[in-house]
Image: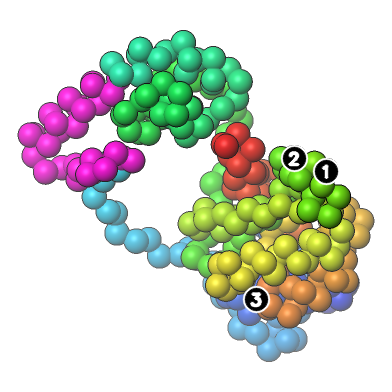
Amino acid sequence: MSNVLSEEKRQQVIALGRLGWSLRRIQGTTGIRRETASEYLRSAGIAIRAPGRWGRSEAKPAIQVSHRPGHSRQLGEGKTGHRDVHRVQSIDQCACEAHREFIESSLAKGRNAMAIWQDLVDGHRFTHAYASVRRFAAKLRVSAQKDACAIIVTAPGEEAQVDYGSGPMVRDAKTGKYRRTRLFVLTLGYSRKAIRLLAFTSSSRTWAELHEKAFARLGGTPRTIVLDNLRGGVIKPDLYDPALKRVYADMLVHYSVTALPCRIRHPDRKGKVESAVGHAQKTP
């Protein structure tokens, strides 16, 4: 063989090969050369899938969805439908214009459209839909120039991303005092469905137990887990070959899930869960 892999890397390549991943995709995700991966897959008796991409589903007609009861209209039904949609949007625009100062100040504090809409409904007797606030906030928000990044497309049930974030202050039932919590988030790569849990500690055992609780709420497990180089899951961060902690690795083996630790200085690989963490922190 051209390269000799560690036992953990070898098991990872074999697990991804059994999931039907192509050699090019395995190389792009793990950094292992296709020639090396193919030798290990052949020795394990696993057929090598040719490069390709998942099938595309047929486009669905555009549907305008609103939080207002009974306010949902399918577009493309004719000129009358388009006129009604524009008229509703114009009315919502005028309603949000009256609260421009409050919306601008809330955006400056980092609050998202959902939180602003909830504040308007609770404190300003706002009766219009959330979609109206979302559209109005999008026009006011000054977005910073961002670097271009690739869109990671996954099949249903194939991938989940996990991460920690800073959680709220919660009263501890044992001591009666408020303590800062850790916010655990698991986000599915295809549907973006997120499971959010709070914990007071962040040990390896807690990290594994939070995964099990998230799997129970989902009613199943993804095929792969993308995680950062957190102490709860990774023994020591490494540029090319991070090693998982035994408790976490054994838990994933029990559920037949393959771990894909992110490389150092590659945070965009789990951008979906980072977005879910930020959304949870900004939304009441």
Which kind of residue does numbered mark 1 sit on? Lys
Which residue occupies 81% across, 62% down? Answer: 206
User: Whole-percent x and y of residue 147?
Assistant: 61, 30
Using the rendered view, name the quadrant where residue 216 is placed. bottom right
- Residue count near mark 2 (Cα–Cα under 10 Å), binned few <14, some 14–19, many ≥20: few
- Residue count near mark 3 (Cα–Cα under 10 Å), binned few <14, some 14–19, many ≥20: many
- Residue count near mark 1 (Cα–Cα under 10 Å), binned few <14, some 14–19, many ≥20: few
- The answer to whether residue 275 is magenta is no
Which residue occupies 64% across, 43% down? Answer: 277
- Above or below — where is 12 with respect to 188? below
Depth check, front residue: 230 or 202:
202
Tell me the quarter of the image containing the N terminus: bottom right
Nearer the camera: disc 2 or disc 1: 1
Give the distance between the C-alpha atoms of the residues marked 2 and 1, in whole angstroms: 10 Å
According to the picture, the residue beneath numbered tag 1 turns out to be: 177
User: Whole-percent x and y of residue 62?
Assistant: 26, 45
Identify the residue at the far right of this view. 236
- Above or below — where is 27 with respect to 41? above
- Name the mark on residue 169: 2
